Image (cartoon, coloured by chain):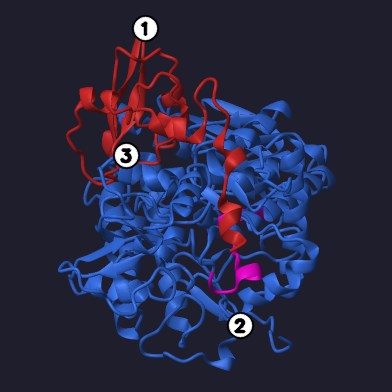
Amino acid sequence: MSLEFNHSYKLANQNYDVSLKADVLVIGGGPAGAWAALTATENGASVILVDKGYCGSSGATAPSGNGVWYIREDQREEAMKSREALGGYLSERKWMERVLQRTFENVNRLDEWGYPFPIDERGVKHKRSLQGPEYMRLMRRKLNKAKIKILDHSPALELLYDSYGIAGAAGVQTQENNQTWAVQANSIVIASGGCAFLSKALGCNVLTGDGYLFASESGADLSGMEFSNAYAITPKYSSITKTAFYEWASFTYEDGSIIEGAGSKRGRSVIAKKLSEGQKVFAQLDKAKNDHDLQKYMRIAQPNFFLQFDRIGINPFENRFEVTLRFEGTVRGTGGIRITDETCATSVPGLFAAGDAATRELICGGFTGGGSYNAAWAISSGYWSGEAAAKYALTYNRNNHDRTLTRKQVVGINEHHTPGETLGGNELTKLVQAEVTPYNVNLFRAGEKLTSSLLILNNLWKEAKSHLGEKDSNLVRVRESAAMLATSRWMYSAALQRTETRGMHKRLDFPETDDHQQRRLITSGLDEIQVNWDSHSFVNI
Amino acid sequence: MIEVLVEEQCVECNLCVKVCPLNVFEKRENQPPVIARQSDCQTCYMCELYCPAKALYVAADAEDTVDVSVDEIIETGLIGSYRKDIGWEKGYKSTASQDTAYKFYLK
C-alpha cells in the first residue's frame, strides 16, 4: 500500500483523522443547505454543514444573478397557471402554493436580515431578484452567527450507517492533505445540488450528482431523471450560462444571414441542430442596440454577463459573437432524489433532500427554463428539510441501538489494490461526458441512440465496480465520476421508458404527448436499474 | 480561467485559497499563494470578487489558457473590475441595492 492511496485505505478501514458528532448533518452549502442548516438550528438541533468547496461561493447560485419566484398572494394563481403546461402537467398545485408561501416568508426574512433589496423611485421594494454573491455571503454570516459548524473544502464521499439506519457521512478535507473526516448524525439533509457533468457551466463544477449517488447507495429512489437535458446558451468559450438577455438577440450563420426560428427559448433546439450539423452559430443583442437605458439595467442586473464580453473586447449589442450550448444536466432540469412527503423526506428514514439534489417536479413538472423556481425550491425545501431533520434527530432515540458506525461497500473506495486493469476518475468522466453531452443523443432523444449509449454506460458501471480508482490518488474525482456515471444511467433509463414528448424530454421517435404517460417516473438501483411509473395520478388537473 | 496572480499586489490574505470552490490555489508560508491547479478552474470569478487587492484576473475563456498582458489589464482597470461591478470595493455600496432586474419582470 503506497502512501498516496492512504485516504482510500483509511476510509475503507474507517480510520478517520477527524471524528465529529451532531444531531443533523447537512451535505452541501448552497442556498438549500444553508436554509436547511439554519432552520434545523432554529428547531433546537446541533448542526454540522459540510461543503465540497466553500459555503458562500460554491454552487450554481453564488456566482449568478438569480430570479426568485417571489409572488404576491393576489398574483399567485396566474403564476402557477403559467407553469403547468410548460412542465407537462406533472406539477402539483398543493406544492406550488406552499412553495410560493414559504418563499415569500423566507425572502422577507432576508430583507429583515439586511439583504439590500432595491427600492424604486416610488419607494417600492423589489424582492424578485437575488444577487448570488451578496445572498450567499449573507447566508454564510447567518450560519456563523448561529454557530453552525461548517467544514469547507470537505467533500463527503459516502454515507455511514449504524444498527438503526443512516448515521452520518465520511469524506476528506482537500486543503488538509486529504485527511479523512467522519460526522455521526441522527439525520442527514442532502443538499449537494444537481449534476452538470463537469461542463464548466457557471458555478456548476462542484455539482456532480454526489448526493444522488449517496441517496441511492442508502436505498433511496429518484424521480424525473428523464428531465435532465438542459443546455444554456453561452459565448463559445465562456462559462456564463445566463440566457435571459438572449431574448434581445438575433442568431446568425457565419456569413451573417439569419437562422430562421433560432431563439433563446423555444428556438434553442434550432441552435442545437445547427451546432450538431457542425455549423457555427453567432449571436448579437441587436434588439437592445438603441435602448441605452435598457443596456444600463442589464449591466446592473447581471454584471458577469458583461464581464465576459468586456474581457475579450466585444460589445454584444454592436458585435456578433460565436455561441454554443453548454450542458447543464439536471441543474436546470427537474429530476432528482424523490421526495415522499411535505417534510422533504426521502424513501430512507432520516434522510432528507433539498434544492437541486431533490426532484423539482413537484413545482415545475418536466421543465424549469429559469432559475427562479429552483431558487424558490431551494429556499423552501431547505427550510422544510432542516425543520424535519431536526425533529427527526431529536425525537428518535437511538440509545438502545448499537451506535457503531459502519459503511457499505461502494464503487471507488477500495481497501486493497489489486493488480490488473485500472480505470481513473478523469478517464471515466470523459467516457461519461461523451455519452451525455452530445445534442444528438441527449437533447434530440430517440430509442436507438439512447439504448446504445445506455449499453456503454452500463458496461462502464461493471468496469467501475471492478476497478475504478485503484490507481487514482484523486479519490474525490473517483467518486464524482461514479456519481456522474450512475446519474447518466438513471437519466437514459428513464428517458427510454418515457415513450412520448413532455416537458424538456423530447423524443424524436415519439413526438406527441401521451395522456397515459402523465405520471412521474421513479428510478432506483445501481447495479440493476428499475424504472417504474409513480402511482400518483394527475387526472384532476 | 484564472490567468494572473500579481504577486506585488497580493496582500497574502489567502481569501482566494479559501473561497475557490475548486481548490485551485495553494497557500504558501510567508509568500503569496500560487495558482496550483489552473485546469480545475471553472471560471466562476469568485476569487477575483473576494480579492481585496486587485491581484487576481480571470480570463473569460473557460476551456483554454490565454495570454494576458498584466500591464494592460492593470492599465485598463480590467483586473478587479468584477469587484467594482458588484460594489464590494472599499467605499462603494453593494450594487444589489440598485439591482434593476425588476424592470424586466415588470415589462
- Mark 2, Cα crowd under 10 Å, few <14 / some 14-19 / many 20+, is many
Q: Quadrant of residue A475?
A: top left
Which span is picked out in magenta?
Answer: A352-367
Category of crowding for the residue at label 1, using alpha-carbon neighbours closer than 10 angstroms: few (below 14), some (14–19), many (at least 20): few
Q: Position of residue B43 (x, y in %)?
A: 35, 41
Report the residue marked by disc 1. B30
Rendered location of residue A423, percent (x, y): 26, 51
Residue B54 shown in magenta: no
Identify the amino acid type marked 1: Asn
Question: Which label's residue is closer to the chain start, 1 or 3?
Answer: 1
Q: Residues within 10 Å of mark 3 (few under 14, many from 20)?
A: some
Label 1–label 3 contact, CB within 8 A: no
Label at residue B91: none
Residue linked to disc 2: A519
Secondary structure category for the residue under label 2: loop
What kind of element bears circle 3?
helix
Residue at the location (61% across, 45% down)? Answer: A31
Front position in the image: A267 or A252: A252
Q: Position of residue A239 (x, y in %)?
A: 35, 49
Chain coloured blue: A
The type of residue carrying mark 2 is Arg
Q: Which chain is red?
A: B
* Residue at mark 3: B40
**Same chain for the residues under marks 3 and 2 in the image:** no
